[in-house]
Each structure stands twice: as C-alpha cells, then as structure tokens.
Image (spheres, rainbow, N blue to C red):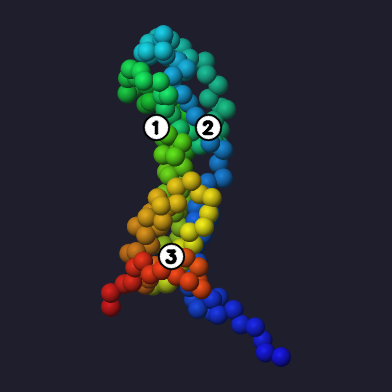
Amino acid sequence: MTEIVNRVKESGLISLSLADFKSNLSIVDVDIADLLWQGLALKEKGFRSWAKEHNWSQYNNKAVFIHCSADAIVPTWTYMLIASMLRDYTNDFVVGSRIDLEKELIRRKIHLQDRQKFMGERVIIKGCSDISAPEFAMVELVRFLQPLVKSIMYGEPCSTVPVYKKKK
C-alpha cells in the first residue's frame, strides 16, 4: 500500500486565508445625529453635558465607528472629544462608516503578523471568505508581503493565479 503524501504541505507554500484577518470584536457606533439640536447642528453645551454623563464603559473591548447619519453641521472638535472619551475603553475606533472600521481592523491584524515568517517564502492568498472588504484585505496583504516574499499567488494551492514574483 502506497502512503498518501500531501504535496501541498511539502511544497513549502504558506497559505493565508482572508478569514484569518477578520476581527472578532463586537462593532458598535456612536451616531452624532442623536445629539443634534433640531436635527441640524450641534450645540457645545448640550454635547459636553452628554459626553460627561454618557456611559463610556459600554464600549469596553469593542470596536466603534463614530459618524453622523444626518446631514448636519458638526464641528470637527466633536469627533476629537468623542475619541478622547473612548480612549480609556478601546483603541479600536475610527471616524467614518462601519466598513471604514472593518478595513482598519483588517489592516491592523495584517500588520501584526511576524514579518520574519514570510522572508523569502512563497505565499498563497485564499480569497473565499465572508470578510466584508476582501479587495481591501488582498491589496493590504500585497503591500505587507511584497517586500518580504519570493512570490505571491491568489487562489487555492491546486489552482493559483500568479500575482507577484521577486526579480532575481
């Protein structure tokens, strides 16, 4: 009886799945629209009272996107004040949309990878995943990996599309 050999495993290829870069943090938002005076503008005094009394601990260990869902006049310092309040509970916040936050979380997770692990290696990036911004993740992986690796491929080990090959 012949032993079954996993040629993919023995090939030395490093296979990365986009799912590995999906954040497991709970995502919540702070919508400034709820704080607007007559739905039009933000009044500093009322906003500062809200900020002082708001339960900021509810954002502990969560990812937060700060936005205004209304077309309103929002001073830029508003976002700074919210960020300063969030900072004691989480480092994972952005001003923008949910997708902006998800992209930032993906970028951070990619750049936390051990660079040494990829030096001179051949890497395959698997594309099938329920990650919310696959194109962003793939481009960010290329940005991170290209200076390090011998080659980057897309797909599955049995059927890859060459993306990058280091010049000799």
Q: Which mark is residue 159?
A: none
Looking at the rendered image, the quarter that the C terminus falls into is: bottom left
Residue located 45% across and 15% down the image: 35
Residue at the spot of label 2: 28
Secondary-structure class at tag 1:
strand
Up-down: is 6 above or below 23?
A: below
Alpha-carbon span between mark 2 and mark 3: 32 Å
Disc 3 residue crowd, few under 14, some 14–19, many 20+, Cα 10 Å: some
- Image coordinates of residue 115 in percent, x first then y, are 41, 62
Q: What residue is pinned by disc 1?
A: 95
In the figure, 79 relative to 103: above or below? above
| Cα distance in 3D space between marks 3 and 1 | 32 Å
The answer to which of marks 1 and 2 sits earlier in the sequence is 2
From the top left corner, tell me how far across and down residue 31 is, in percent: 46, 24
Q: Amino acid at mark 1?
A: Val
Q: Is residue 123 visible?
A: no
- Towards the viewer: 111 or 154: 154
Q: Give the SS element for disc 3.
A: strand
* Quarter that holds the N terminus: bottom right
- The residue carrying pointer 1 sits among few (fewer than 14), some (14 to 19) or many (20 or more) residues within 10 Å by Cα, namely some
Badge 2 or badge 3: first in the primary sequence: 2
Residue in the image at 36% along x and 20% along y: 71
Amino acid type for the residue under numbered disc 2: Val
Residue 64 vertical placement versus 159 (above, below) = above
First in residue order: circle 3 vs circle 1: 1
Residue that mark 3 sits on: 154
Q: Answer yes or no: do the residues labelled 1 and 2 have beta carbons within 8 Å? A: no
